[in-house]
Image (spheres, grey):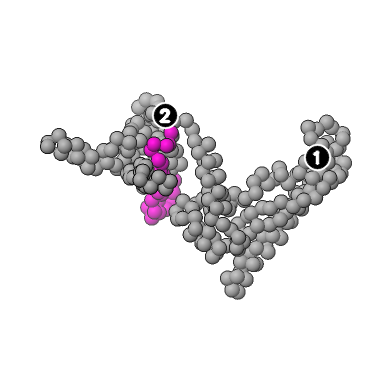
Amino acid sequence: MTLAEFKQLLKLIQKKLLQEQIDRYLKTRSQCPDCGAPLKAKNYTNRSFRPLFGTFKLPSPRLRHCQCQRRKTASFRPLSALLTESVAPELLFIESKWSSLTSYGLTVKAFKNFLPLDATLAINTVRHDTLKVAERLESELGEEQWTFIEGAPRDWAALPIPDGLITVGIDGGYVRSWEAKKKNFEVIVGKSTLAFKRDDEDAEVAAPSSKRFGCVQTEDTKSKRRLFEVLTSQGFQLNQQITFLSDGEDAVRNLQLYMSPEAEHILDWWYLTQRLTVLDQ
């Protein structure tokens, strides 16, 4: 089989399975849930849905509510309750993951190479989907705190034995503004690496677990919360050893303060020696 034939086969299989699932769901919603009477259709339309293997048109009938009970509306579309979004979560996941690693243009080219997506897939579509995922993740972040150390040493000692050492490297840099070319803004990025997990049977041979994070210091109002959530996703506990590697720049140093009572801070002396040099002169 050629690559084009393989893509077409995947698309046909998913179309068949998707249509079967939709028909089965609509059949279960075609009767009144109270009296069991069949519901009459008001009109028939189609709606677009984008899963991993192309864009499909799905039948979306509008049904009239049964008169046995008082309803807020006279009719409804049962498919709207099943498909709350026009894009499948799997496609949103892979779009946002690839977009975080490379440009939107290269992401679109990669998708078209190995997925049977429509030739009309545009860069703006991937950018819009990635932004939608990012906004949802931002809304789920908890409130910012100046310290994330809670409890007392007695409480920390009662925690289970933690996983391996967490090493966090943080650095900052200046990026030129796209809209105002003569202006720069500061970006702080980091990488958190967990040495091993104790419940992992292959901990001795498994590669360390790494996660990355970043923020624009002047715009982000939850930078410490962002770092804390990354650590929490790796199973971080307050009795766990953690090492921060960074320089002495104020914004970077303040980001990692009061994160853990077991934290060790190793600083690059660049900013400190810079100030000492000025004092010496």
Choose between 180 and 6: the one closer to the eye.
Answer: 180
Image quadrant assignment for residue 53: bottom right
Q: Secondary structure at mark 2?
A: loop
Above or below, 146 against 211 in this view is above
Q: CA distance from mark 1 to mark 2?
A: 47 Å
| Residue at the disc numbered 1 | 75
- Horizontal side, residue 241 vs residue 102: left or right: left
Reading the image, the residue beneath label 2 is: 145
Q: Residue furthest left?
A: 281
Give residue 172's quadrant in the image: top left
Query: Residue 149, position in %: x, y?
Result: 38, 29
Q: Residues within 10 Å of mark 1 (few under 14, many from 20)?
A: some
How many marks the image carries: the answer is 2
Which residue type does callout 1 highlight?
Answer: Ser
User: Taking the image as drawn, is residue 61 in sight?
Assistant: yes
Q: Residue at x 32, y 38 (%)?
A: 252
The residue nearer to you, when weighing 149 against 92, is 92
Would you say the magenta stretch is mainly helix, strand or loop?
A: loop
Q: Position of residue 67 (x, y in %)?
A: 87, 35
Q: Is residue 275 left or right of residue 253?
A: left
Of labels 1 and 2, earlier in sequence is 1
Q: Quadrant of the N terminus?
A: bottom right
Over which residues does the magenta segment extend?
A: 197-221
Instruction: Find out whether the residues at labels 1 and 2 contact each other: C-beta distance under 8 Å.
Output: no
Mark 1 or 2: in front is: 1
